[in-house]
């Protein structure tokens, strides 16, 4: 079976939000049924993964939240990019339920004093859980508003005590093809890797999310730990993190390797820099029909534009 790499998929292969609701109805109709396996036997039986998880205790509202109304939980939890579980928007909600998220450990490496393998609860212990209602923008020109629950990445980094040589923070997703059947296909160079410059990682807007809508993250949305940097395109916001490495040099990220002319390291939302195959000037919010103008830095320009003072953002896209 020939699998096209994502950067070779034509525009016609990208789901329009106007078709989304009808496609969701189709998914719901097949959930719980046994789907015939592909020629490689990867996707044998879907597991519904869109049910709400347990409520997270002691969550504080954040002053950094937008006042834009959030999208519905049902939509946010069933329309995802998570190629580890399939390349369509609907497959992650069908197949991510098989992934085990407890126990979960995170390896801390590189230019930092407190290296080691940490149980997730120990890593985040005593950090404040906040609800951050953030705008979220995908490179494919669709967007949503999500009430994430997470901890300050700045505070975690401070606790880990990076050295003066730490200029970047690299994140790596779980690699486990048995649990993540999409990794059995050479769609991307696994495991998934992303990174931030250290000043981006320590910006007050950056969080590590463990939940959304007041509840534990669904697997398809990146459980149990994912990055949220809301001024960047969605692919930058890596899911199911198992390693955080502090480096002196800029990491080569997964999408940079896959399509360097389409996906840059910074991935800042910029309506003036088009993707080679579509415009970024407008976006369609999930569940809506009409497009709206894309805001520079996804509407967070007042907070983050200073990070890129003097940089040519057409070159450093």
Image (cartoon, rainbow, N blue to C red):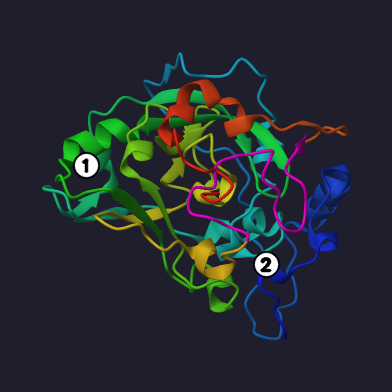
Alpha carbons under labels 1 and 2: distance apart: 38 Å
Circle 2 sits on which residue? 7
Q: What segment carries the magenta color?
A: 262-285
Measured as percent of width and height from the top left, residue 264 is found at: 53, 55
Q: Nearer the viewer, residue 199 or 215?
A: 199
In this orientation, does residue 219 appear?
Answer: no
Q: Nearer the viewer, residue 66 or 163?
A: 163
Q: Is 65 part of what is drawn in magenta?
A: no
Circle 1 sits on which residue? 122
Q: In the shown orientation, is residue 288 left or right of residue 188?
A: right
Q: Who comes first in sequence, dot 1 or dot 2?
A: 2
The local secondary structure at tag 2 comes to: helix
The local secondary structure at tag 1 comes to: helix
In this orientation, does residue 115 appear?
Answer: yes
Q: Nearer the viewer, residue 54 or 182?
A: 182
Q: Is residue 183 above or below residue 159?
A: below
Q: Residues within 10 Å of mark 2 (few under 14, many from 20)?
A: some
Q: Is residue 37 above or below residue 175?
A: below
In the picture, residue 213 is in which quadrant?
Answer: top right
């Amino acid at each position: 079976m020939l699998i096209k790499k994502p950067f070779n998929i034509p525009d016609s292969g990208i789901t329009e939000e106007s078709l989304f609701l009808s496609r969701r109805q189709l998914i719901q109709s097949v959930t719980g049924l046994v789907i015939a396996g592909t020629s490689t036997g990867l996707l044998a039986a879907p597991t519904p993964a869109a049910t709400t998880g347990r409520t997270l205790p002691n969550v504080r509202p954040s002053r950094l939240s937008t006042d834009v109304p959030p999208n519905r939980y049902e939509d946010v939890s069933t329309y995802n990019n998570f190629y580890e579980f399939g390349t369509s928007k609907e497959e992650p909600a069908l197949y991510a339920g098989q992934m085990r998220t407890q126990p979960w450990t995170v390896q801390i490496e590189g230019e930092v004093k407190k290296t080691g393998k940490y149980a997730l609860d120990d890593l985040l212990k005593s950090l404040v859980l906040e609800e951050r209602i953030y705008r979220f923008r995908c490179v494919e020109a669709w967007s949503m508003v999500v009430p994430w629950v997470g901890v300050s990445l700045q505070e975690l980094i401070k606790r880990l005590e990076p050295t003066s040589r730490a200029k970047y923070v690299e994140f790596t997703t779980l690699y486990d093809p048995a649990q993540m059947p999409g990794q059995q296909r050479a769609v991307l160079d696994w495991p998934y890797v992303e990174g931030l410059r250290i000043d981006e990682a320590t910006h007050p807007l950056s969080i590590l999310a463990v939940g959304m809508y007041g509840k534990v993250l669904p697997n398809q949305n990146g459980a149990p730990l994912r990055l949220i940097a809301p001024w960047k395109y969605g692919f930058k916001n890596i899911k199911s993190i198992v390693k955080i490495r502090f480096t002196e040099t800029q990491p080569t990220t997964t999408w940079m390797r896959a399509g360097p002319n389409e996906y840059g390291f910074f991935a800042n939302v910029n309506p003036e820099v088009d993707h080679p195959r579509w415009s970024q000037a407008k976006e369609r919010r999930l569940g809506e029909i009409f497009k709206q103008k894309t805001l520079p830095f996804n509407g967070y320009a007042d907070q983050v534009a200073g990070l890129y003072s003097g940089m040519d953002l057409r070159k450093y896209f």
